[in-house]
Structures are given as structure tokens and as C-alpha cells.
Image (cartoon, grey):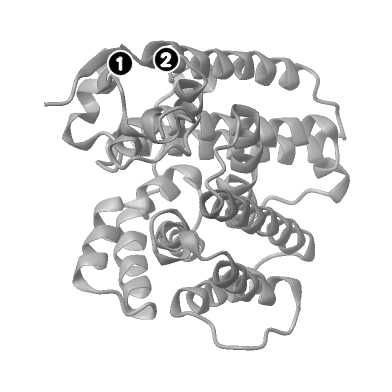
Amino acid sequence: MEDRTSVILPDLFRCFLIQEPRVNDGYWTAKVASEQWLTESCDFTPGMRKKVNACDFSWFISIAAPDAPVDRLKTLCDWGNWVFPFDDLFDSGELRTDYVTSQHVLDSLMANMTGKHFIGSKLPIVKAHDDVYQRFQNGSSHGIQRRFARAMQHYTSGVAHHVEHFTTNHIPSLQEMLSTRQLSVGVAPLYHLVEYAHEISLPDEVFEHPVIQTLERLGADFVILSNDILSYRKEEGEGCPFNMTAACRLAGQSAQEAFNTLGALLERRYIQWNQSIHCLPSWGVEIDSEVRRYIVGIQNVVQANISWSFRSERYLGKNASEVRRTRKIDVMTNPPYLKTMDPDSS
């Protein structure tokens, strides 16, 4: 039997995350319709259909956009339910070891959003996203469309970096991993989907301001760091070293030290968030009101992620509520990837 050790997780419910989330009243209606749409659009097997249902990303979306009308909520749920099976193609599916085909699929995904002509066939899951984007495009301004397309471009670049690291057996440093994740985590597209769903109206100059850009980055970092804390036990069992907790362990830290390191990175960002909020400029009463709505949208995305992570069985199984209460989990004392990645082990 493998040797295991108990660790204490950082306190993830800090700052604005101490509040209980609001859930959109249209959650159940949107969930049922969205899951049916996705499984039919992609011709999913019963097994994949069950996986999408168990994932219940519609609940995440319903916290991220609690005030969205049901038609726009459904469009967001479609995107949210879409992104997990799409992401899995590159994380654990056949594309994670095929950089050339991966780039072709990513190019096909971006074609409609960038107005570029794509030559070749598209996977059903890419066609599904084309459908989502068409609806999003019909109900949003050119500014929102441009911001969403840019965020999706960053997402696909991050996915491509991840596949490249996997195919070359390159284990990135903690900072390299954070930089790649800031692109590939898929948080920025959600900001602009919520902007669309809540019909937030802001001029471009707001999004170009350094304080707003800092808040957007911090929101992504909250998601990345908490994800790598909560998903670590699942990923170490799969032998996956592409996790910031694993990066700390590869650098020689014990399991508890690794979690403490990520906790310290989170703590620094809680402080930076509060500092940035205090540095917000004023653009006038009307715009300031919309800015507040956009910032609440960032907070809702972060809140949705952490709440969903403890509700879903994706990372912590059926013990999620107990882990939230005690902050204790057990992990491998010497996970296999430590030996596999050790240059002296050959």
C-alpha cells in the first residue's frame, strides 16, 4: 500500500469569497436544455453524457451570472458545458500528444471569431462552439465580441503551450506554469460572457485601464491557484506533474510546504485585490456603476469556481464537504512523478 501523508489546505474562503453565492433562478431550466443541446450537437456517448451531467457546470455558470435572463444563461451554460470536454481533449485525450493536430483544431475553433477562412473539416465539438458564438455575436456589441475573441485567443495559445510542454516532456517552473495557466485557464472568456449576459455597457478605455486589467488577472490567479490546490490529489494519482503544487514538490518541497507556497501566493493576491479596489479611478457616476457591476462579475466567476469545486465530485469525490470543513486531505508521500522526473533516477 502506498505511503500517504495528511496536509492542511490553505484557507480558500477569504476576501469577497466569504459570502454565500447567489444562484440564478433559471439554473435548472438552463441546465437541462444545455446538456441536451451539447450531447446532441456533439453526438456524445451515454458515458460522456453522464459525465457532463455529473460535472454540472451549469451550476457554476448560474453563480457567475446570477442575474442573466434565462436565454442568455442558457448560452453561457452551453459554453461552460462545452469547455470541459473540449479542454479534456488536450489534457487527457488523444490531442495531448499531437501538437500538429492540436494546433489545427485550435485554428478551426478561432476561425469564426477572428473572421479568418478555415480550410478543412471541423470537429463536432468545434461546430458546437460556432453555434454558441453565433448566438453570443447576435446579442452583443462589437467591443464585447472583440474582448471575447482576444480572451479565446489567449486561451488557445495557453492550450497549445500545454500540449507543447507535454509532447517535449518539459516540466515548466512555477512561474512558467502560472504564466501558461493565466492564458489557458479559460477565465477571461467568462468575464466577457458575463458582460454579455448581464448587458454591462462600458467604453473600451475602462478595459484598457491598468487597475481593471490587474483585477482581471487577479481573478484568474484566484481560480488557477485554488484549482491547483484542490485538483492536486486527483492529478498526482494520474501521474500528472503539470500542477503548481507538483512544481513545488519537484523543486524539493514537502507536500505541506508545497500547499503552503500556493497559499502564500493566494494571500499576496488577496492583498493586491484590496489595494487595487482602493485605486480604482472614477469615470463618472453612470460608468462607475457599470464598472462596479463588471467587478462583481469577476468576483462571481471566482466565487463560482470555488463553490463549484467543493460541490462537484471532480476533484475531491464524495468527501468535499468534509474537506471544506477540516481543510485536511491525504496525498502521496512520494508520488510517482517525483521519481519519473528525477534526472538521477535513470
Position in image of residue 222 (x %, y %): 55, 29
Location of residue 258 with respect to 170 vertically, above or below: above
Position in image of residue 142 (x %, y %): 78, 66
Give the residue number, with chain letter if any, for mark 2: 10
Which residue: 25% across, 13% down? 6
Most distant residue in the left direction:
1
Which residue: 38% across, 12% down? 256
Which residue: 55% across, 12% down? 264
Q: Tell me which label, 1 or 2, sits earlier in the chain.
A: 2
Pointer 1 with pointer 2, Cβ within 8 A:
yes
In front of the other: 259 or 203:
259
Which kind of residue does numbered mark 1 sit on?
Answer: Arg
Most distant residue in the bottom direction:
120
In front of the other: 184 or 188:
184
Q: Can see residue 296?
A: no
Position in image of residue 223 (x %, y %): 52, 34
Q: CA distance from mark 1 to mark 2?
A: 7 Å
Q: Residues within 10 Å of mark 1 (few under 14, many from 20)?
A: some
Question: In which quadrant will I find the N terminus?
Answer: top left
Give the residue number, with chain letter if any, for mark 1: 327
